[in-house]
Amino acid sequence: SHTLSVKPVIGIAAAVQPANNVLPGGTVNYTVTVSNNDPAAAAAAVAASNVSVLAPVQPLTNVTIPGSWTCVPTTPVDYCVSFAPDPNAPAGTLSGSFTVPLPYGTAVNFQAAGQAAFPLAQGTVVQLKAATTTAGPVHTCATGTALEADGSCSAIAEVTIATPELGIEITAAPNTALVPGTGTTVFTIKVSNPSGNALVLTDLGVQSLLPAGVTATGTPTCTVLDTPTPAAGDPTSTCPTALAMNGQALGSAQDGVLLPGGVYTMTVPAKVELAAGFASTLVVPASATTTNPLLAQSLQCTAPSTKLVSNDGCVTKTSISNPAAPVISVSNGVNLGSTAPGGNVVFTMVAMDEATSGLAISDGT
């Protein structure tokens, strides 16, 4: 029989980086460590024979391993050369055993790149379980590992999925009774990363298109507000650079960054020209996009914005309206009455705005 004092104490550890806020389709680094170095077994220092390892234990679904595993020794003696992989193991699975005993003090790392599946819902937790055992099984499990019913020792690494969220809205003030030729307004575009979202949004740009008859009268501006305010030295949100008008089009570089809770506020002063015409409603769209493909493919848009057909951002719109054109009528008359020969005659001319536009008549003769 075997006693605790002469049994090897097998350790197994599973770790994944990053473990949190992993994008659907994103890459993680999975490390499995097999060890015989538990401090509680230092006095006995028993070598472990016929050590085998399996990772992940469950079928690969929500996180797959498209490539192969690599073995990294942590001691002067390279025990990786003594690891014999199972040739029949499923693709992406670490499975095999060491052909020589692992002496006390030994630890061997196995590493592989994993890929989260797409799509996966916000908050999905993926467990990557690893297990090791010896023939018999004549061993105990190291502190921090679990003893399974089959005698193996196991450990679990967890990956938590997060999906990005972006909001954009555009307003105009004022947005009604903008008289062609004189009416002015200011368009305000706000782009936000909701505070409940844990992901930093990167590679952001903003676009808008003024309708025919509306022209920008000044340089677009962008300010940013982070809530809460980052501590000194911590990263901050940054507006996309090169924000400018090109004719009717507003555009920027795709280099903006928005922290969770961050908001861009962009303004464009504009004038409604005579060419816009009276009694019209003009629609002004605005969109925010990202050139980060992982962010783009799983991006969610908050109301009132919706996903772009190009699938790389969110779009919204606003509108401005012009009043009806004034309708002017002119009447005149004369009242001769009992005017004596050679007397004065008074002519009366009346000009009236017959429309309901509410416009004052000016600059007329």
Image: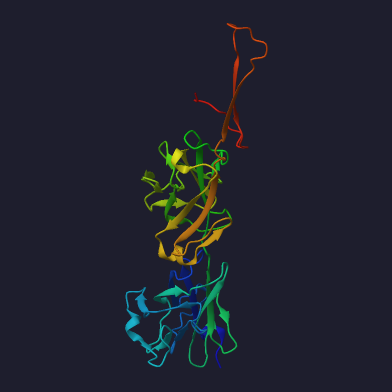
Q: Is residue 298 above or below residue 148?
A: above
* Image quadrant occupied by the N terminus: bottom right
- Residue in view at x 41 percent, y 88 percent: 97
Q: Is residue 230 visible?
A: no
Q: Point out the residue furthest to the front here.
A: 341
- Residue in view at x 32 percent, y 84 percent: 81
Left or right of 354, for residue 68: left
Front residue of 57/307: it is: 307
* Count of numbered circles on the image: 0
Q: Is residue 120 above or below residue 341?
A: below
Q: Position of residue 267 (x, y in %)?
A: 48, 41
Task: Classify residue 49 by image quadrant.
Answer: bottom left
Front residue of 104/90: it is: 90
Q: Position of residue 130 (x, y in %)?
A: 50, 80
Left or right of 77, for residue 289: right
Q: Point out the residue furthest to the right here.
A: 338
Q: Is residue 301 above or below residue 326?
A: below
Q: Position of residue 152 (x, y in %)?
A: 53, 86
Front residue of 266/29: it is: 266
- Residue in view at x 44 percent, y 57 percent: 289
Say how the picture is coloured. rainbow
Task: Classify residue 109 by image quadrant.
Answer: bottom left
Front residue of 354/30: it is: 354
Q: Is residue 296 visible?
A: yes
Q: Position of residue 24 (x, y in %)?
A: 48, 69
